[in-house]
Amino acid sequence: MRTRPLLLLLLLLWFPSLSAPARDKSENWIELRSQHFSVITPANEKTARRIADQFERMRAVFHVAFPNVPIDNVAPIVVFAVKDDKDFRALEPEAYLAKGQLKLGGLFLRSPEKNYILMRIDAEGDHPYSVVYHEYTHLLLGRAAEWFPLWLNEGLAEFYQNTDIHENDVALGQASIENIELLRQNRLLPLPTLFTVDANSPYYHEENKGSIFYAESWALTHYIYITDAKQKSQRLLDYVTLLSQKVDPVTAATRAFGDLKQLQSNLDAYVHQGNFPFFKLAATTAVDSSTFKVQPLTAPQADALRADFLAFNQRTSDARALLDHVLQEDPNNVQAHETMGYLSFKSGNLAEARTWFEQAVKLDSQSYLSHYYFAAMSMSAGADDANAEQIESSLRTAIKLNPSFAPAYQSLATFEGMHHRNLDEAYKMALTAAQIDPGNVSYRVTAANVLMESDHAPDAVIVLRNALKVAKSPAEESMLQDALSHAEQYASSREQEKQHNARVEAEWNATQASASAAAGMSAEPPRDEPPPKGPHHFLLGKLQGVQCHAPSIDMTLTANGKTLELHNPNYFKIEFSAFGFTPKGDLNPCEDLEGSTAKVDYVDLPAKPASAYVFAIEIHK
């Protein structure tokens, strides 16, 4: 299931469930860390070094070929290199375990937190590292948009998997003899079918159909790529551009490649020809293996890593069984606590997840994922103000331990926005997350929310309109459109409110000036008290005892038996809004708030117990 889909193609043109028991105690697992990869394997150190070396060399190839492409993924890249098919099946997705399913040689799992690659050491063929190259291509394509078609995603991975790396040059796009023989012996899939295959299609899973799909995806990619190079055309680029504009795959193919029946005929002729050209790239890919670090893994450490892979691979029951075994042998295993927390989160038990991650933080303060997950779970569970300091500390620690981890920046931005503090920093945090992972539009939504919280709604509208241009799926488009509509309404409401407040304040000042002049006194504008600093709190209750001494206002809020005195020296500075209804006419705070149910945003006044400075009032129907 060589997974998902960007950037790379646009620059290419430039040039039955099985259990997962604890492992055999006779196996000795090791972890080898190179500069950009971590290899986990039961094989010997020599094999681990060879695998890491190949990944580093492949990375170097892409770095030389495309120096302007950000090829280093921000999440850790963990390579599970298992010995044989038995070990592979103990970890691969359940969808591929049934009889007749496509037999995988490798697997790639991607998430914002980490990346996993599963491969077999005993892979055979003319290119024994084809799985390595194939899966690494998927890693680079992993930043691509959801609209990136599966056939091209797999076709490019197949194109690069037969790469040969030499001392001074690299051979790219060598023909796959296995694919050619398969296509010559079988009828090609109709191109409209090929273009619409997705991850749920039987052509992507069933053994025979899957093999045809991969082979034909390679052949079409190879044919168009080579033909474009010879004719100095850019049909692949045109095709991807159309897809990015939300054109359906078949229509986009017709417009970019021409008549599909003719293309089908040309492709059939292509796979029956005798010569398949490829590219040679002059490049040196030397790797300094002296920097590789190797350490043995204990049985619980290796099993905990395997369990984490199973958890991310949706094999939940197998992961839990293995984790129970690990925690019996090693109750303080940090990885096991992290994974148990992840499984609890996926099952919707946020309180249990938070407990697991809190324990993981206590066991290892240097685990950025434990810090991040603990904070995220605490926020999701609606943690009260008593935990605010601990949440903020964990998020800042996660960022310090891994400055390239975008989710921590987003969570800190959200946290500060929720507490209406450090909003300038919150906006910078959201921007940083978006810069690290430009394809994740949720980071842009967070930035827009912070802008609205800091009363910059027009800027939030601009951010969301720009985000719509890079939406990758109908779901993202719908989510962004909803956010944009809300931001536009909020911006319009705030502008009307400001104009109204300015008009009322001007009228009040004029009245005061007239009264002062009639009394022979000089009119002085009211002096605003500086708002107090401190954490913002939110409370829903009933407003009573509203008293105005224009322009100041005082009132009490009663909620759950608690009475809070609220004050603001200038009610024109209070942000008023309505929830669940549309007010009739202009709001007069001195007359219309009495007896209202409202949610208030306030900061405690330390000098006066049970009193607060009110910043915003949201009136409920």
Image: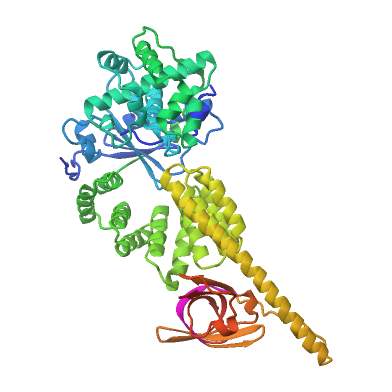
Q: How is the image coloured?
A: rainbow
Compared to residue 618, the image places residue 608 above or below, namely below
Residue 475: percent from left, percent from top: 41, 47
The magenta region covers 533-544
Residue 351: percent from left, percent from top: 32, 65
Q: In this orientation, does residue 7 appear? A: yes
Residue 36: percent from left, percent from top: 44, 37
User: Relative to 111, is 186 on the left or the right?
Assistant: left
Residue at 58%, 81% (x, y): give it.
589
Compared to residue 291, the image places residue 482 above or below, namely below
Depth order, front residue of 283/228: 228
Depth order, front residue of 24/74: 74
Residue at 22%, 35% (x, y): give it.
96
Instruction: Please name the predominant secondary structure of the magenta segment in the image.
Output: strand
Examine the structure image and report whether residue 227 is included in the region drawn in magenta.
Answer: no
Q: In this orientation, does residue 173 appear? A: no
Residue at 64%, 84% (x, y): give it.
552
Q: Quadrant of residue 265?
A: top left
In the picture, which quadrant includes the C terminus? bottom left
